[in-house]
Image (cartoon, helix red, strand yellow):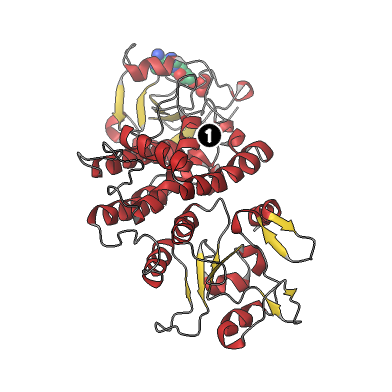
Amino acid sequence: MRAAGVVLNLVLTVVATGAVTTVFGFRPLLVTKRITTTTTTQLMAVTSQSTMATDKNNNNSISNADHVLFDVPVSNNGARCRIILYKKGISSDRVDIVSPAALGGLRSEEYMKFSPLGLMPCLSIQKSDNPHGISSLAESDTIARYLLSEYSAEGPSFLPDHPRSNQICRWHDVYLQSIQGCLYKPASRLPIGDFPDRKGAIAAYRRNLEVIEGFLGEDGVGGAGSSVAYLCGEEVSLADATLFPSAVFASYMLPKFDEDTTSPRPPLPPKLTRWFDDLRTNDEVFSRVYREIMDTLVKSWEETNHRWDGIWLAGLRDTAPATIFDRIISGEIPAEIVRQDEHILAFRDINPMAPAHILVIPKDRNGLTALRRATAEHTDILGRLLVAAGEIASDKTLGFGDGARIVINDGPDGGQEVNHLHVHVLGGRKLGNTFC
Ligand code: AMP
């Protein structure tokens, strides 16, 4: 809601007449049109308590257009709907683009009557001839396809039945977009999709871009003789509108996570790079949407809020020196390994303090030089370490009896010597009651 407010401020321009207009066609409030109660009944019902403007006929209104698309410039999923509207040349009296801030923000009761989870974009259908009896749509692919059907007679069709386009759209929405938060969400908003940590989600994000690249086939994009080539050939498709905003995010954000910051890997695979560069440079509508998204990303997210400064693997990285445990993990020096998997390694302590003394460590330190460095980014590995410690403590073949002491030394005062988080599992006899 706060972010929407910021965007609102960015896009607002108050003109001399007192009416409100916006850069890029975004309006937070409409104040110039007469309300027709037959076409605005539903919207009026939910906005009666919200921040309203009064038009010259003394009516309260958000908009009396046929449709209201609730959206803001940086909204990735909303951008596909805007591309359709811009390409088809749909005027604001048919689809008005309004910030959710006009209803009190994404989490406001008023907005959530349209969009149950408070997400963007959302389309309010207000026209009188509404054969479907549906008053709002709250999911971007559904909205996009509605707009293609509603305005099928105007502008490009966007190839709504093209199998390649549909494959790319579905793959994007199910596998790529669903984990895109790994590029910008703070640790407090992990896990991301099926991925408990950012590193896994980013690897999967890259992999899904490769999968989409594979869908392009031999003809690819940028075929000989074409001035602008789209994902399905010479004609723009819904896949272009769907994938392009994510390509803007990926091209700007993925390099921030590259391990080699001096020469980062290209964020997009080769065919997608050509397609993206071509559209953002040569296609007027895609260039416009590129600027809409980038304007907020650069000026608000990056320069004002320094968003990536606090994000693990982007602004925050593990720069501490390697320890002896890295050499055990790599096999460079021997250890008596008792258990391991993809994430953890357990081995006997070289200087045992009890008949059974096992150390459990994360294979990827990932900033965990000590427990005090733990953040929400580490929730998964911390859980794995403790589960492994518990299993080891109950393993009689390792010398444990009825119970164990499980200890993490943390920092110099805690007696920690190796700066790589490790859990001591001690047992094999009844241990004393003193901790220090
Ligand atoms: P801490 O004092 O909590 O940092 O524990 C570090 C532990 O690592 C000590 O108990 C050491 O005995 C153990 N240790 C150090 N080097 C090795 C090694 N090469 N193999 C096994 N355990 C080691």
Is 147 located above or below residue 407 in the figure? below
Q: Cβ of disc 1 within 8 Å of ligand 1?
A: no
Q: Say above or below: 399 vs 375.
A: above
Dividing the image into 4 quarters, which one contains the C terminus?
A: top right
- Whether residue 104 is visible to the viewer of this picture, yes or no, is no
Residue at x-position 26% and y-position 62%: 161
Picture coordinates of residue 53 (x, y %)?
74, 73
Secondary structure under tag 1 reads loop
Q: Is residue 305 left or right of residue 68?
A: right
Q: Is residue 289 left or right of residue 241?
A: right
Please name whichever residue, 260 or 153, is drawn nearer the observer in this view of the structure.
153
Horizontally, residue 198 falls left or right of residue 214, namely right
Residue sitting at x 56%, y 60%: 71
Residue 359: x percent and y percent? 41, 26
User: Residue placed farthest to the bottom in the image?
Assistant: 38
What count of labels does the image hold?
A: 1
Q: Residues within 10 Å of mark 1 (few under 14, many from 20)?
A: many
From what the image shows, is residue 54 above or below residue 161?
A: below
**Residue identifier under label 1:** 312
Residue at position x 57%, y 88% in the image: 38
Residue 425, located in which quarter of the rendered image? top left
The residue lying toward the viewer, choosing from 223 and 107, is 223
Tell me which amino acid carries mark 1: Trp
| Image position of 265 with respect to 382: above or below | above
The quadrant of the picture showing ligand 1 is top left
- Name the foreground residue: 69 vs 309: 69
| Residue 287 location (% of width, % of height) | 49, 44
